[in-house]
Image (tube, rainbow, N blue to C red):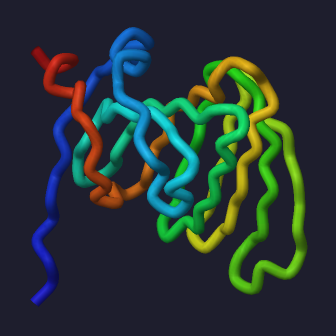
Amino acid sequence: MPEPIVYSKFRLVTPDDAALEAAPREPFPLVPSSQFRIVTLIDEPAVQAVYEDWFKDNDIEWVYWLDTVHFVVSGEAEITYWDAPNWEQEQKAIAGPGSFYLAPRGCRCKWRVLSEEPFRRVVLDIPNGGYTTPDVAAQADG
């Protein structure tokens, strides 16, 4: 029998810089020596939206197991990436304010923040990957 359809709820949120700046710096899961800040904006079955800061001299690495879109708000980072399925060719891109990019399922990425200010992004995980982060979405809904 097929799985029942699970519906998400409509959400309208505005990223809150003050809430992100008040969030504690945490070790990044795959690179515990690197720290980042994160707050959840939306946590629905269809998508998880988070607001994140990454910092200079705190390189981050990740392999995506679902499709993810990043909208850059401030800061600048060099992204080294290897596309799936074989990660054969190393490629690089620079992302800065106003740019956005797709990190597709299976892509391996490494970020090096170039700016003194944090590399701040809104990240959409599609569908919701189930990551647990401090939640400010309840404040936005209230």
At 76% across and 28% down in the image, what residue appears? 76
* On screen, residue 77 above or below 64: above
Residue 29: x, y in percent? 45, 58
Left or right of 110? Residue 68 is: left
Q: Quadrant of the N terminus?
A: bottom left
Q: Which residue is at the far front?
A: 33
At 36% across and 29% down in the image, what residue appears? 24
At 89% across and 61% down in the image, what residue appears? 91
Q: In the figure, residue 103 lies in which quadrant?
A: bottom right
How many labels were placed on the picture?
0
At 37% across and 58% down in the image, what residue appears? 127
Left or right of 117? Residue 14 is: left
Residue 140: x, y in percent? 21, 17
Left or right of 27? Residue 47 is: left
Q: In the figure, residue 107 lies in which quadrant?
A: bottom right
Q: Which residue is at the far top?
A: 18
64 and 113: which is toward the camera: 113
* On screen, residue 41 above or below 35: above
58 and 115: which is toward the camera: 58
Q: Which residue is at the far bottom?
A: 1
Q: Quadrant of the C terminus?
A: top left
Left or right of 51? Residue 110 is: right
* On screen, residue 64 above or below 17: below
Residue 32: x, y in percent? 50, 56
